[in-house]
Amino acid sequence: MLILGLSFGYHDSAAALVSEKGIVAAAQQERFSRIKNDAGFPSDAIAYCLSQAGVEPSQLDHIAYYERPLLKFDRILRTSLRSLPRGWPYLKETATDWFRDGKFRPLALIADHLKVPPERVSAVGHHLSHAASAYFCSPFERCAILTIDAVGEDDTAGIWHATGNRIERRSLVRFPHSIGMFYSAFTAWLGFEVNEGEYKVMGMAGFGQPRFADQMEALFTFDGQGSFTLDQRLFDFITPDDVAYTQAMIDWLGEPREPEAPFSSDGETAVDDRAQHYADVAASVQAATERILLRLVREAIALTGERDVCMAGGVALNSAANGLIQREIGCRLFIQPAAGDSGTALGAALYHLHAVTGAPRHPPLQQVYLGKAFSLGDIRSAFEAAMLTDYKLFDSHEALAEEVAGLLARGNVVGWMQGNAEWGPRALGNRSILADPRNPNMKAIVNEKIKFREPFRPFAPSVLAEKADAYFDLPGTPHVGAPERFMLSVCPVRRERRADIPAVTHVDGTARVHLVERDTNPSYYTLIKAFENQTGTPLLMNTSFNLRGEPIVNMPADAVNTFLWSGMDALAVGPALVRKTSQ
């Protein structure tokens, strides 16, 4: 049995293919189109998934789409009419776009594109797709699920109870009462792009004090049964193309931050009092969000009677909150690595496979290298097209790792591309830019000369799993699929180790840890082990292999372009190593 799951039409279009034996392949369209957060029909991602199985569309048993479009348009229609006359231009533009792009009939579009009978295509609810994406990949036989995002159809959050192959809803929150949109409104006020800059707010939060957190938390009213309302006076969610905050927010917090305004020149302190104020607002919205999520997880546990918890939806990518949930509540936590809308493609497919057809559940997800791989021919073609003629091919991965580890130990920044691309937004050692975590200047070097981004942005440590306790205060023993295995949780760096690894220690003394195991990524493990043998440090500084505003690289040609356009010193693609100084 082969089930294809699809998400497209809003942002983060993706395709995922599953069978009764497991996940065959999964990828976002942006990796192929090179358009960040591409919302278009995921034709390239579909073609990749089908090629992995060696099948044609006619051989698919079913195709599952990630939401019910008429429910979404009904919400847009109702909220726009309530806000007349202000809502009329938005409603008119949206309806025009929907008719032009066929958004009223995505199931028919899918059937037409893939040339399959319409009865083979169905829709799964947006938040149900989120819930399934987490639960059916988790190690839990039964659990509570919290889905939480900006808005999907008319829903913004939900608590679910999962047992066996069944997922049942226990509570629901409807638009405009949204934690995701609450966070995004402050993201916009802080001068960052909504649906893209929320993680920058998390980075900025480490520089501030949560002076406004109590007032922000007080905007929410909870019913104790997993639902809440959000005071709307500070927000304008009716016309999302405009700013999501009102004059009332400006009257309270002052003028919004200008995009690209100076914040931190050294990645350690704010440049002035105004920048510090923005940091305090970021810290406040982060702290308020953490408190709200703690409350909702506790309510999910109470409503379902379960101690194990799954999470999905864009808000589940808030790694600082995830770490706090683990430490404060002590529950086992599983988060779908592609927790945003791309993950709903996988969730829709898994829901149909397990909940609709009754197929037995797969083993839990332990690695996310589900994207496209490449060949030596792809490498040679990319190097030749860029006139990179002086490169070295290694006979063994151990020899490559030894040389790259030496480059890193001597202060070089290396692009590292191996095997299949990662599923989800985190670079987990197959599409990564790597550097020496011991170098206190490396954070500034990579931010300014490699990534071309704000100097306050932090980096993650990829650490050998068996050595992690010596450096980080992990929330218990990581279970199968624990957030730390997918770089989805922040934890404190041990105080006595902070000076040893300054490049990956956040300004508040924490780090977004990535545990690396030999079984799940032997090539990356071998590299970190080689670095440990040469330096005594069993971890590397890791960031995603892309420039600011671009998707993570997918194929060798993408990696070569990024290498040439940045200040990277060397590039390792498969068995090939090229250095700028040799060209």
Image: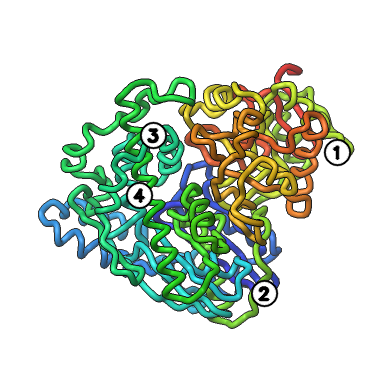
| Amino acid on which disc 4 is placed | Ala
Residue at 32% over, 38% down:
281
Q: Nearer the viewer, residue 231 or 303?
A: 303
Q: Is residue 352 above or below residue 415?
A: below
Q: Earlier in the sequence, mark 4 or mark 1?
A: 4
Residue at 14% over, 61% down:
82
Q: Is residue 521 above or below residue 565?
A: below
Q: Considering the numbered disc 4 on the image, is that residue within a helix, a strand or a loop?
A: helix
Measured as percent of width and height from the top left, residue 453 is found at 48, 28
Instruction: State if disc 1 and disc 4 touch (CB < 8 Å).
Output: no
| Amino acid on which disc 2 is placed | Glu
Residue topped by disc 1: 398
Q: Earlier in the sequence, mark 4 or mark 2?
A: 2
The answer to whether residue 430 is left or right of residue 44 is right
Q: Earlier in the sequence, mark 3 or mark 1?
A: 3
Residue at 67% over, 66% down:
55
Residue topped by disc 4: 288
Q: Give how far apart the Cα atoms at labels 1 and 2 are.
A: 36 Å
Quarter holding the C terminus is top right
Closest to the camera, between mark 4 and mark 1, is 4
The answer to whether residue 234 is left or right of residue 500 is left
Closest to the camera, between mark 4 and mark 2, is 4
